[in-house]
Image (cartoon, rainbow, N blue to C red):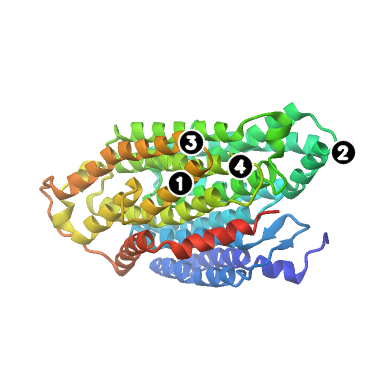
Amino acid sequence: MNSFITTDELLLLAPEISMVALATLVIVLDLVTKKKSILNYVASWGLIIPILLSLNLLDGTSQYAFAGALRIDYFGVFFKLITLIATLITISISEKYSEKFDDYQGEYYALILLSATGMMLLASSVEFITIYIALELSALPLAALITFMRIKSSAESGIKFMILSALSSAILLYGMVLVYGFTGTTYIEDLSQIINKFLRGSEITFGGGALLLGIILITGGFAFKISSAPFHMWAPDVYEGAPTPITAFLSVASKAAGFAIILRIIYSLIYSTTGNPINQEIGIDWSMLIAILSAISMTLGNLIAIQQTNIKRLFAYSTIAQAGYIMVGLAALSSLNGGQDDAGPGGILFYLFGYMLTNFAAFTVITIVSIHNNSDSISSYSGLLKKSRLLTLVMTISIISLIGLPPSVGFMAKIYIFGSAMDTGLQWLAVFGVLNSVISAFYYLKIIKIMLIDENKNSDPIKLSMNYYFISIGCAFGIVILGIFPGSIIEVAHRAIESIIY
């Protein structure tokens, strides 16, 4: 591996480099222009460049950069595109919302772009130090963005996020140190080879217990990223206190980046083409461990969500439950011992793409209603049908998808995820997921009832800008179309998974 940075390596990182350049441009424009609204257009339209550069990398090959620390493959590009689309929508729905902190719009958009850059790097990272740096690059801007409202609850949320993020980073780093100490490598792809050599009777030895502890600590660090129980404590307060577009960004982009690196590590440490070395050596049933965490996450999230009166806190607990559903696919993956069945991880990628459309459809409505009513209370959605039929329709479609009802992408995603559990002997977990989906219908349908039936004294119609109009319709349309014709995204998801089988 060449230790020098070459032109070819820089070209492989063209999407990330263009993101940093765009963030710099936004800051410079903020200094020289008094018309702050232009920053939104520059940031959103400028994202077309990294999107096109990312699409250019979809050539089906896997290439390495920076001494093998980054692997540019179909899988990584898939998650880069999810991050870029999420960033584009986040910036677009911030058009009116960012007027609440008009003097800091430049910093606001630049921090979103820099956080997204870290998430994009994370999707391609295959080396522990690079993973850690990418994680911090994504998390530190988020800590600042959460406090942008400059109110007590926002500041409190930012401090909680910073402290718990630092704690999770310390846990993650300690786990990485343990794994390095007993394997002698920081490269993910080398770990599987070292473990398999040991299983074949090689002289390479290491302490199984310490290695297990290291892997558990790494898992705990990433569980914070995806807001999975029992590392979910930060989510409700942070989601409530953060600017609404940032809440949406956290719920989608941050979660997708976390699952991207978790899948890379699981493929190397637990599911390799030569078997399941960690299970064989240490005797831990990883499938059951992940399945239990999945069941706890979905149950805890759904039961507590029922009690919420704030729409953002409700969606915070909803996203904890959604993490549990997605982890069903991880449990199905971990239950395999070799082979090439990618139903579980393929389902995860499809689920994340559908979840992106679904959550942004909902949060576009939440952002608009929050601006109009100056409230995030669920009761403020009463009489929404009379104020805006379009917003009511979009929110209803997104809720149908979150529950997992046809003909939505959420229905197909859950069929795919739960089906993979059934196929790998985890029938109880699939049934558990279906029961939790029924529980979630209680608080989701309550929102629909409030929008359609409850009366509101304020019946002033809600006017939409073109940004909100196109995003809400586009996301709702995508939810329905992928619910009826999921084949194209499923095929892309399978290709992405095939690209990381070492």
Q: Position of residue 316 (x, y in %)?
A: 39, 41
The structure residue drawn at horizontal position 48% and vertical position 36%, both measured from the top left corner, is: 294
Q: Position of residue 175 (x, y in %)?
A: 69, 35
Q: Are marks 4 and 1 in contact (CB under 8 Å)?
A: no
Say which of 76 and 130 sits in front.
Answer: 76
Give the number of the mark in front: 4 or 3: 4
Q: Quadrant of residue 210?
A: top right
Give the number of the mark in front: 3 or 2: 2
Give the number of the mark in front: 1 or 3: 1
Residue under label 3, please give it: 294
Residue under label 2, please give it: 202
Q: Amino acid at mark 3?
A: Ser
Determine the secondary structure under disc 1: helix
Which residue ends up furthest to the top in the rendered image?
209
Q: Are marks 4 and 3 in contact (CB under 8 Å)?
A: no
Residue count near mark 3 (Cα–Cα under 10 Å), binned few <14, some 14–19, many ≥20:
many
Q: CA distance from mark 4 to mark 1?
A: 14 Å
Give the number of the mark in front: 1 or 2: 1
Specify which label sits upstream in the sequence, 2 or 4.
2
Q: Amino acid at mark 1?
A: Gly
Residue under label 1, please give it: 419
Residue under label 4, please give it: 336
